Image: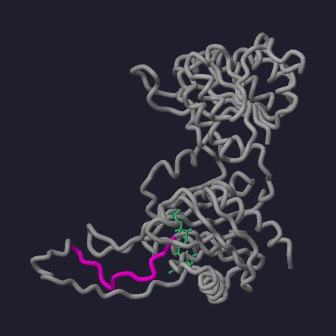
Amino acid sequence: MRIVVGITGGIAAYKAVGVVRGLVLAGHDVHVVATEAALKFVGRPTLEAMSRNLVHTDLYDGVAEVRHVALGQSADLIIVAPATANTIAKIAAGTADDLLGTTILASTAPLVLAPAMHTEMWSNAATVANIATLRERGVHILGPASGQLTGADSGLGRMVEPDELVAAALAIVGPRDLAGLRFLVTAGGTREPLDPVRFIGNRSSGKQGVAIARAAAARGAEVLLVVANIEDADILNGIAAGGGIEVQEVSTTAELRDAVHAASPAADVVVMTAAVADYRPETVAEVKIKKEVAGDTLDLHLVRNPDILKELTGARPAGQTIIGFAAETEPDRDALLELGRAKAARKGVDLLVINRVGWSEGFGTERNAIIVVSGAGDIVAEAEGLKDAVAHCILDLVPDLRSSP
Ligand code: PMT
């Protein structure tokens, strides 16, 4: 996609570098239009290096190619980040006294603004009216967020974080091919308590499951996301604000099982990304286990947990699509595939997403590599990349799967 990023003169302009980078890494052709004021906060070389294109500022540059309107005419999406109170007022008034103004006026592409200013400016009647006008015209306003501002003050006015902005802006122009579907997605890893202070757990961060939930919501689905022990708050950042995703927190396998069974009858698609503990301690100590009492060795007696995924496929309502994951440490691709195929058959899923896990693979990482097999064991997709991109690759399979008899 060809995306114009307008950068205006506020301290949050430094965050625009992250926005440009995120869009480029997502494979888009990014053209920066910076106001003179923006370049007082962030340097042209930085923006050119990040966008891999020349930065445009002057209304009178590139006159022969009619650049003052060409950038807007050829854009598939325009994002203004940060959008200052002044720029918001100018866009609302339709002024065209600089390159960003002419670019926006000449464009029919979706327009996304990420406001950034002090709380008093955001709540000023003039800004409130301008935002209302822009919203009425179909402009997408993302943020502002609440938190520490540039001075000693804090409150509403922070520009939303770059990765959130990129994801939300791309979702606005993305396909809505999952609209009308209800998704149940699990993420994170269950924990089984040993005593009030210790547990047996795993290293799932929740990133892959949350990426699937975000991607499904971005494509129009209504999502219930059941999360087990996601410790990094950033992973769930902006979900409540983003819409389309309801979050339910659980910790143990029993809690996850209850939540999933309660929600699954109403779900059109279930995606079991959570790393579920296969075993739990047979008894949970009421008080902290003391080494003085246990001695030099401690035997734990573990019992099998129910296989939630298998229970789901065994009792699935008509028309429900069930996607499971397989986390395997097998290094050999053929052997890995065989393990996945056997698991797909055993669990009775429609799709099984096989990913290799290990000390530095799968769990907790930003990236993932997957092979997706059908219930019959055929390879239907392969992908390698950021967990967001991998999520979209899995979801790309859903519409066809649901339309085939
Ligand atoms: O959270 P991240 O850090 O981003 O890492 C992502 C991930 C590596 C955890 C994820 O991509 C993944 O592989 N999730 C599945 C982990 C897992 O439990 O795999 P498994 O092969 O042990 O289980 C197979 C399937 O059965 C899974 O869909 C699992 O949710 C389900 N299961 C497992 C055991 C059990 N008792 N009940 C289940 O429902």
Q: Position of residue 401 (x, y in %)?
A: 80, 72
Image quarter of residue 81: top right
Residue in the picture at 46% in, 59% down: 230
Residue 58 or residue 172, whichever sits in front: 58
Tell me if 107 is positioned left or right of 111 in this view.
right
Count of marks overlaid on the render? 0
| Residue 54 magenta-highlighted | no
Residue 240 position (above or below residue 61): below
Image quarter of residue 263: bottom right
| Residue 277 magenta-highlighted | yes
Residue 316 or residue 335, whichever sits in front: 335
Tell me if 332 is positioned left or right of 316 in this view.
left
Residue 366 position (above or below residue 93): below
Residue 117 position (above or below residue 264): above
Residue 238 position (above or below residue 335): above
Magenta stretch secondary structure, dominant: loop
Task: Specify the quadrant that holds the C terminus.
Answer: bottom right
Tell me if 25 is positioned left or right of 155 in this view.
right
**Most extreme residue toward the left, as rendered?**
292
Residue 263 or residue 164, whichever sits in front: 164
Tell me if 32 is positioned left or right of 187 in this view.
right
- Which span of residues is magenta-colored? 275-287
Q: Position of residue 345 (x, y in %)?
A: 67, 88
Q: Position of residue 75 (x, y in %)?
A: 82, 33
Residue in the picture at 78% in, 10% down: 97
Q: Quadrant of ligand 1?
A: bottom right
Task: Specify the quadrant that holds the N terminus.
Answer: top right
Q: Position of residue 287 (x, y in %)?
A: 20, 72
Image quarter of residue 221: bottom right
Colour mapping used in the image: one colour
